Image: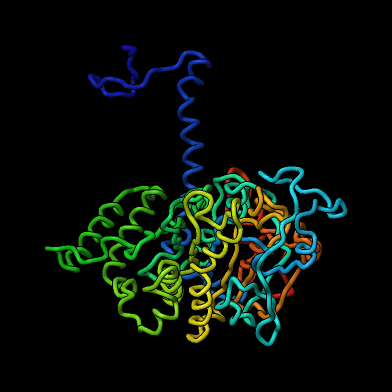
Amino acid sequence: MSSRRDSSVPRGRPVHVRRTRTRREFLTDAFCGFGALALTAMTRQARLHANSVGGLPPIVPPVAPKARSVIFLFMAGGPSQMETFDPKPLLNQLSGQPRPASFGEAKYQFVESDAKLLGTKRSFARYGQSGLEVSDLFPHLSRCADDLAILRSCHGDMVVHSAAQYELFTGRVVPGAPSMGSWMAYGLGAETEALPGYVVMPDPLGALEAGQPMYSNGFLPARFQPTMFRPSDRPVLNLESSRGASIEQRRATIDLIRQLNGAAELPLDPEFEARLLAYDLAFKMQVEAPAMFDLSRERPSTLALYGIGQEPTHDYGRRCLLARKLVEEGVRFVCVVSGGGPGNMQWDAHKDIEENHLRKAAETDQPVAALLRDLKQRGLLDSTLVLWGGEFGRSPEAQTSVGRDHHNLGFSMWMAGGGVRGGQVVGATDEIGLRAVKDPFHFRDIHTTILHQMGLDQHTLTYPHLGREERLTFIEGEVIRQIV
């Protein structure tokens, strides 16, 4: 350090600033300072947006909403359109033959170029006043036909699980973007203080190909991340009161931590603030939520309606019932996953479409129908938008001999409640279920329709990220006007 002293400094006090002698030295010394200025500006902007909502209080949407909550019944792996909601008599007639060239080409992951068409063993009948066609895989759901708006012409861009799952949840084919649930929490907050605004209930059989990133908050602040419930009869641990500490003592501890952190001169880091909010939410759940998670308090008739206490419906029935209870309390977005772990444990019927779909439908048909009926009789279906579907469908051609490959060119999903006009079929695939040919609906159109029903607009629900205003629909989607 230089021994030179400045005349303005009292004698005897050392000077801790080295004078720069050249422009190069000045730029070298100032380099970190310039970076700090930029970082300060960036973090300040992030903090402003992170704190703009302030916890997750309810936010009044710009347009009067038709729905206030969403339940996504995610059939992971890709249920077949031909076996569920899109009967194809010609496919049965052509079974065992090559696909006629007039239907065009399709890219698959595993189907060989010389594969033959595979007919279905499922039968269809018309149900309800609407005469909606539903497969015999769903004897319970068929009784709710007049509530369903079946979209037979859905399509996506990817034919592999992970990329297709990212696109279904986030509108992007790569990880890093916020999911539908996080966008809902960001745009609308939650109508409950004692429960999360966005909940995911995974399948107990294991994780999916896209993993946690497809559900995540992406570049949105951490407070909009999902709360993952455990796939068991105890979805949330440690809800019981702590031994040796009263509710008042635990509340005082939380308040003291918040006061100490509030003493900081600068705003808290968004990640740290989200952690504090999580502690606060955990306390509120311990005080107010245990009774909601205790399904033994439900009426026996309600448990029987969902198939709880019997196989194979116990697990999915329990999670569907919990989904109803969550939206009843004001949770904004709930995802209930069917399918987990490798291949055949999902709706991923590569080897045997019959065995796979009979098993998965037996697990989910009664609980899904019970959810719709329960919501309806409680007056909640009008305010709860229910979405059913997977990341793609299945191929008209056989994989090996009796399985079907992934298929993204045309498949079925359905919506119910939340202002959706049920009892109708919208869109169509061609005569063998290969391609959406009438009113094709991309995932972005489904996202736009969900936002619309929740009183949100794809153009105004944005968040600044890397210099641009990001939104759920990367490419502009269209509201499916036929069903709203």
Task: Tally the numbered discs.
Answer: 0
Pinpoint residue 8: horizontal percent, then vertical percent: 33, 24
Pinpoint residue 340: horizontal percent, then vertical percent: 48, 54
Left/right placement of residue 110 relative to residue 55 reads right
Pinpoint residue 277: horizontal percent, then vertical percent: 35, 58
Pinpoint residue 168: horizontal percent, then vertical percent: 61, 56
Q: Quadrant of the N terminus?
A: top left
Q: Nearer the viewer, residue 77 or 115?
A: 115
Left/right placement of residue 382 relative to residue 254 reads right
Q: Nearer the viewer, residue 36 or 149?
A: 149
| Res. 281 in view | no
Place residue 461 in its image quadrant.
bottom right
Q: Nearer the viewer, residue 159 or 449?
A: 159
| Res. 284 in view | yes
Q: Residue at x 31, y 80 (%)?
A: 297
Q: Residue at x 34, y 12 (%)?
A: 2
111 to 20, vertically: above or below: below
Q: Nearer the viewer, residue 14 or 170?
A: 170
Left/right placement of residue 288 relative to residue 63 reads left
472 to 465, vertically: above or below: below
Q: Quadrant of the C terminus?
A: bottom right
Place residue 415 in its image quadrant.
bottom right
73 to 350, vertically: above or below: below
Q: How is the image coloured?
A: rainbow
